[in-house]
Amino acid sequence: MALRNSMRIRGLVKLISLIIVCNQVLTAAFSYACRTIDPTVTPIVISGFGLISSLMISYWLQSDARRAYHHASEKKLVKGVDASHPLPRIDDQCPKKWLVMLHIELNPMLVGL
């Protein structure tokens, strides 16, 4: 139970960190472009863009991780936990290993944790 919770927290921290970094970059670029075109643009427009882009980034990362996990599962690149290996194993041949690991961390019950 403790391993499942720690994996889930680690996955959430990774997801939130990626969302924050990507959102800051996108919002800064959008803000610069808006202020170049119209210097009187209101902060609500930029904040709204930041909110919507963070939601879209979150959805995109989670759905891409889910897709990568299902692809890796179909190709037998993910091995669940057992007595000799308490953590899931992902084959080195997996093309999107970090996304597969993110999905496993967000959903540890998929590999038997």
Image (spheres, rainbow, N blue to C red):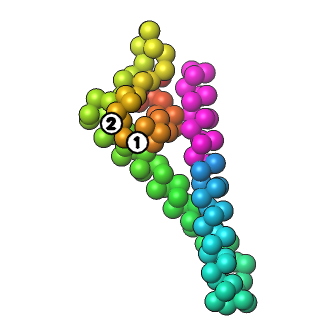
Residue range of the region highlighted in magenta in the rendering: 1-16
**103 inside magenta stretch:** no
**Left or right of 73 in this view: 4:** right
| Residue denoted by label 2 | 72
Which one is earlier in the sequence, the residue at label 2 or at label 1?
2
Residue 90, placed above or below residue 100 = above
Mark 2 touches mark 1? (CB < 8 Å): yes
Closest to the observer: 15 or 98? 98
| Residue 51 visible in the shown view | no
Horizontal and vertical percent for residue 42? 72, 83
Would you identify the image quadrant in which residue 48 lies? bottom right
Q: Residue at x 47, y 39 (%)?
A: 98
Horizontal and vertical percent for residue 80? 39, 22
Q: Residue at x 39, y 30 (%)?
A: 92
Closest to the observer: 19 or 96? 96
| Residue denoted by label 1 | 96
Alpha-carbon neighbours of circle 2 within 10 Å: few (<14), some, or many (≥20)? many
Magenta segment, principal secondary structure?
Answer: helix
